[in-house]
Every structure is written in C-alpha cells, then in structure tokens.
Amino acid sequence: MPRPLQNGMLLMAFAALLFAGMSALAKLAAQQVPSSEVVFFRSLLASLILLSIHASRRQAGPWLGKRKGLLLLRGTFGATGLLLYFFALDGLAVADAMLLNQCSPLFVLFLAVPFLGEKLRLVQILVVPFTAAGVLLVIRPDLNLLNPYGLAGFASAAFAGAAYVCVRKLTRTEPSETIILYFAVLSTVISAPLMLADFQWPDGATWLALAGVGLLSVGAQLLLTAAYRREKAGRVAMVGTIGPVFAGLLDLAIWDRLPDWPVLLGAILILGSLLALHRQGRRSQPDSPKSS
C-alpha cells in the first residue's frame, strides 16, 4: 500500500469526503422517496457488494467471522444509531440532527479509554471544545433540542461512537468487509418493515441516486475501517468532523449555497484541531498500532 494511504487519519478524511457525497445523494433521493427507503436500498446494495467481494476471493474465509458476538454488537450499535438518526430527522432540521450525530467522536475518545486501553492525551482533551465549536459554526443549529427527537439524535451519536469502538477492536481479528457486512445486513433487516410500510416506487433519477448512496457508503465504510486499523480510535474519530466542511462544498456545487463567515471560521477551527491531532500523532508514532 502506498505510504500516504498507511496514515489512518488521511484515510478517515477520504472516508468523510465519501460520506459527504453519500449524504448529498441521499438528500436528493429523499426528495422523492421516504428516508427509510433510502436507508433500506443503501444497506441492501452495500450487503450485495460486500458479499460479491467476499465470494470473488480465491481464499475467502468464513463469512460469519471469528468474533460473532462482537460483530453482532457492532452491527446492532450501527443499525440502531442509523435508525435513531433518521428518527431525529423526522422532527428536527437536518442541521440540528447532523450536529447531534457529530458528537460521536467525543464518545469515541472517552469510550476508547476503558474499552480499548488507549490513553487520553492532553491535546485530545484540549481540541474537543475547539472541534465542537467548529462543527457548531458550520452547522449552526437551533438551540431548542431538548425534545424526544433531539434526545434521539444525541443517542444516535452515542450508538455510533460505541460502534466505532467495536470496529477498532474487531480490526485486530476480522476483515474489513466482514465488519461492514454485519452493519449492512442488520440495517437492511431492521429498515425493511419501515420501508414496506410507506413504499414509493423511485423514478429513474432516484434509482441512480440510491445506487450512488450504496456505492459511496461501501467505499466510505471500507476507508473508515482501514483507518481504525492503522490509527488510534480517538484521533481517527475526530477526523470525521471534517465531514461538514466537505458537505458545505457540495452545498455550493449542487445547491449554489455560499458559505458565510461563521462557516469559514468553523472550517478553520476543525482543520486546526485536526492538524494538532496529526502533529501529536506523529510525536507518539511508536505507540501507534501497526498496519495489519
């Protein structure tokens, strides 16, 4: 693998870019079909792609993986977080739900200490408020979030953080495709009854958008899992907060929405926080996990 792609934080940045693209396509598709339908087809296509990748390998291992219990836990955490996020979208502005879901790196930072044995360094603690402030400036949510939908959005971040911690632990023994497959299959199964209850047949353009959502989600998940394989969970998770910056660029390209000064200031805070994490990561490189 080329040397730049061995950097877990860089891989996570690419994953954030694909997630932003996936979200833009999902937003376009959701204008024609219910959000539960977008989740279902995203997860179904991801499952089929991952199964095809596994079947094409000459020396493919067991499909169910070695640590089935932890894989099921990761898939359940991920699927539950996804469903909670879409429930939050039913009652909140998209910006509000995104902000709450962006809290997941904060959960990862602190969950990684007791469950992964990682040390919480001073620079990681110091960048948390700056990163949170940057995300706040980029998304600028309303302040009235203490309601069932707001609590669901915050809970989705907690479940996402727990899922990412499971990913970090699973990368020591499981292939990336197996880890993602559990999440995709469980999300498909759980979203199926919600989709069938309000199914609407997509038109041609919407089918293309749904296909793009599925393809980008697989690519993003593969990059995310590779990032957790090569770098400590806390630093990798914080890189994911760059996603709103990419989303802002897509807003400009697709919906012709120009960023104003709060968005630009937020981008500076986020990128500055990531730079601080990267510099700290280079100084502590001997303690970083090896690529496997």
Image (spheres, helix red, strand yellow):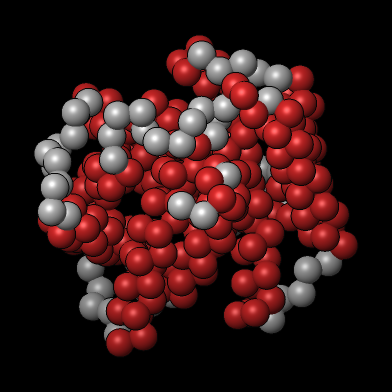
Would residue 133 be found to the left or right of residue 24 on screen? right
In the image shown, does 258 or 117 lie closer to the viewer? 117
Tell me where residue 252 sits by quadrant.
bottom right
Q: Residue at x 44, y 44 (%)?
A: 226
- Using the image, determine if residue 273 lies above or below residue 264: above
Q: Residue at x 68, y 70 (%)?
A: 249
Q: Residue at x 59, y 52 (%)?
A: 4
In this rendering, the count of numbered labels is 0
Could one spot residue 131 in this view of the protein? Answer: no
Residue 261 in the image: state x and y as whole percent.
Answer: 87, 62
Q: Quadrant of the C terminus?
A: top left
Q: Residue at x 34, y 64 (%)?
A: 214
Residue 21 in the image: state x and y as whole percent.
Answer: 51, 67
Residue 72 in the image: state x and y as whole percent.
Answer: 24, 32
Residue 5 in the image: state x and y as whole percent.
Answer: 53, 52
Could one spot residue 225 in this view of the protein? Answer: yes
Would residue 62 be found to the left or right of residue 287 on screen? left
- Using the image, determine if residue 47 lies above or below residue 288: below
Q: Residue furthest front?
A: 2
In the image shown, does 82 or 148 lie closer to the viewer? 82
Would residue 289 be found to the left or right of residue 283 on screen? left
In the image shown, does 124 or 144 lie closer to the viewer? 124
